[in-house]
Amino acid sequence: MNMNDMRSVERIVNSHAAKIAAQNVQVHYGASQAIRDVSIDILDRTVTAFIGPSGCGKSTFLRCLNRMNDTIPTCRIEGLIRLDGEDIYDRRVDPVTLRAKVGMVFQKPNPFPKSIYDNVAYGPRIHGLVQGKAELDEVVEQSLRKAALWNEVKDRLSAPGTGLSGGQQQRLCIARAVATGPEVLLMDEPCSALDPIATAQVEELIDELRANFSVVIVTHSMQQAARVSQKTAFFHLGNLVEYGDTAQIFTTPQDSRTESYITGRIG
Amino acid sequence: MPVHILCLILLAIGLAGYFLGRRRALQVAGGNAKLLHSLPAYHGWHVALMATVPALLLLALWLIVQPIYLENRVTGHLPPEMAATPADVSLAMSDIRRLAAGLETAVDAGVLTEEEVRDPAADPAALAATLKPLGVALGTTPTPQVLAAAREYRTTAARLSVARAAAVLAVALIGLIAALRMARVDLWARNRVERAVLGLLILASSVAILTTIGIVWSMLSESLRFFQHYPMADFFFGLTWSPNFKGGSELGFLPLLWGTMYITVIALAVAVPLGLYAAIYLAEYADPRLRAWIKPMIEVIAGIPTVVYGLFALITVGPFLRDYFAQPLGLGNSGSSVLNAGIVIGILNVPFISSLADDIINAVPQSLRDGSLGLGATRSETIRKVVLPAALPGIMGAVLMAASRAIGETMIVVMGAGAAAKLSLNPLEAMTTMTVKIVGQLTGDTDFAAPETLVAFALGMTLFAITLALNVLAVWIVRKYREQYE
């Protein structure tokens, strides 16, 4: 790929306000501990990349941020995670409402077996975000535009979403998440099932989404982290080893483990 | 030589062929199995198959042809008045066969000697008297012609049996030797054996298809005979079912179709919601430990014989419906009712639907559920809007299969809804179904030329067509929507 891996150097972090603040988070699956004492501030309107070798806990931690781990019976979470200052594990917080605010895009594109339109309209419909068909049409169009998919599908909105190509499916899933009007978008290796061209499209899209959302992306590709993110967190064996500006992590890592990982010696 | 002994000898030849073939293969390879194209065991199988398969085919052919040949030969001895029509010939042949078998038994038991049997001057009446204590009952005293024919039958059969054994064994040995001579390092024994296995697989699948064709054919031919006796329009559009073996029957099938459909609809109205809700609970909400208990328990219901359900309908559900619904509401006072049979058949189908639907719901990828939950949908919304639509084709298939089962159910209908054909809307009245009438028309002393009996085949054919159409519909629905989430 002819992309300049280091172009993030020139990028500025738009905001310094913490959107999500995690303090001393521990996660256990049954008897084994997946996350040890992680504290991190995720900034608003910023792309934050979580990198690290397989099994380091980065996806687990990501799923803590919208309580998707609640669906796993053996999973136990300790510590404090606040979204805009509010504890998301508080008894009064409904995980369902939280997930509407903190959207998620998964590793494998998972469009519903419905039409493209119904896929995007799913969130607005269940949350009652719109009134009337015209308004829903507008939301669907805007979401598909934000996901850079509108021009490709505008003539076949009633075709099944599962009939799209892999890259289009993943952008459809992003449009679906965007349509719900989230404040944070979590992406769990969103490009791992895509070819390089589709990956480039999705990466470009992530950079545009930064204008409206706080984006957290888990990735195995260090080039991708360098290309799309402003902040990078390196996880290793359930620990958050290092967190800082992407340019700094990739050029002058403070920890020897980070350096070993980004130079390819561990992983 | 009897056929079973011949088969045992063939088996032994095959076994010997296997070991000989294996040894021979190693021999031609100079003891180094790596030089062979195929493993020695494949060479063994190759020899065994070459020795037995052609011989078995010849034996099968012989067994089909021999009776035809024998019959032609023996009927030549019959006087023309005994062989006037095909029915006479078949009657005479069964006498001849019985007598020939009787003579064989007598010789085996030592009651008669070979000479006594062959003696052309023997008195048929005396022979019949000798055979009687041996359990060989002859309808009438055989005529001399029949006796002569039986003698001819016996000697020819004995000669043919020897010829058969000789021919089959010769073919087996030729096959064995030819296969052993074929053994070379580069013989593709593995491929040849696998082709033989492929043939076996094709044979097995064609048996199932041919059986179905045979069933349809026999039903169809009997149905056509029925329609020669009874007008087709009266059968398909008649509103009265009153068979009478003395003649003047009215054989309208609509009351039976109505009863069948009424019971099926009630059964599905019971089974589909119960089964589907149970499946949703089991697949989506139940704790895995609880599920491990509940699922087998629900499936136990499916293992109970339907006659036991019939008893349940007869002594529990039926009287309950009569005492608490039919009589207070003035809708009749019969313990047998459509509702009774429908409810019990519905209960019978609950585990069927719940078990199938549970598997289908479990097959919906977890990623779809995650996607929906990740957008802030509740579990219930996820099930209603994502999981069930994705599982719908499979669930429809399960429902239609349950409908086929309900249509074909007989025992519960007899015990729960009675056997009176009736066209009525009242669900608390006794009615009956096509399957019950099929059994009813064919049991007891029946005359297979009367339309009252033959109507069973027409009913069976119609039932077959209805269930086939339902199954085709199920397959079509499943195929149309199948690729949705794959």
Image (cartoon, coloured by chain):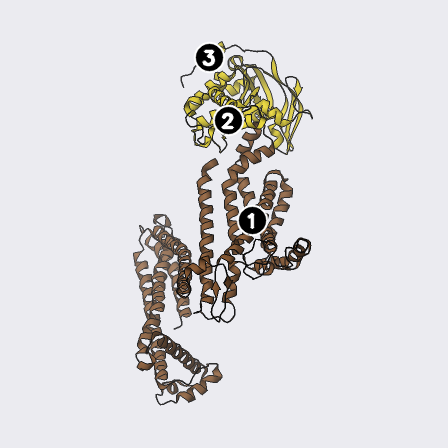
CA gap, disc 3 and disc 2: 33 Å
Chain letter, yellow: A
Marks 3/2 same chain: yes
Q: Mark 2 to mark 1: distance in Å? A: 36 Å
- Which residue corresponds to mark 1? B268
Q: Looking at the image, which residue is at 62% across and 25% down?
A: A97
Q: Chain of mark 3?
A: A
Q: Nearer the viewer, mark 1 or mark 3?
A: 1
Q: With B29 as the anchor, is A87 left or right in this view? A: right
Q: Does residue B358 appear to the left or right of B21 in the view shown?
A: right
Amino acid tagged 3: Arg
Name the mark nearer the viewer: 3 or 2: 2
Residue topped by disc 2: A120
Q: Is residue A76 visible?
A: yes
Circles 2 and 1: CB atoms closer than 8 Å = no
Relative placement, left or right, of B84 versus A257 is: left
Instruction: Give how far apart the Cα atoms at labels 1 and 3 are.
Output: 65 Å
For the N terminus of chain B, give its image quadrant. Answer: bottom left
Residue A223 visible from this viewpoint:
no
- Disc 3 packing (10 Å; few <14; some 14–19; many ≥20): few
Q: Amino acid at mark 2?
A: Val
Please state which of residues B411 and A256 is positioned toward the viewer in this rendering: B411
Q: Chain of mark 1?
A: B
| Label placed on residue A7 | 3
Q: Amino acid at mark 1?
A: Leu
Residue B284 vs B259, above or below: the answer is above
Query: As drawn, is B370 to the left or to the right of A166?
Result: right
Q: Nearer the viewer, mark 2 or mark 1?
A: 1
Which chain is displayed in brown in the rendered image? B
Q: Secondary structure at mark 1?
A: helix
Q: Counting other residues with Cα less than 10 Å from the Cα at mark 1, is it few (<14), some (14-19), or many (20 or more)? A: many
In which image quadrant can residue A131 be found? top right
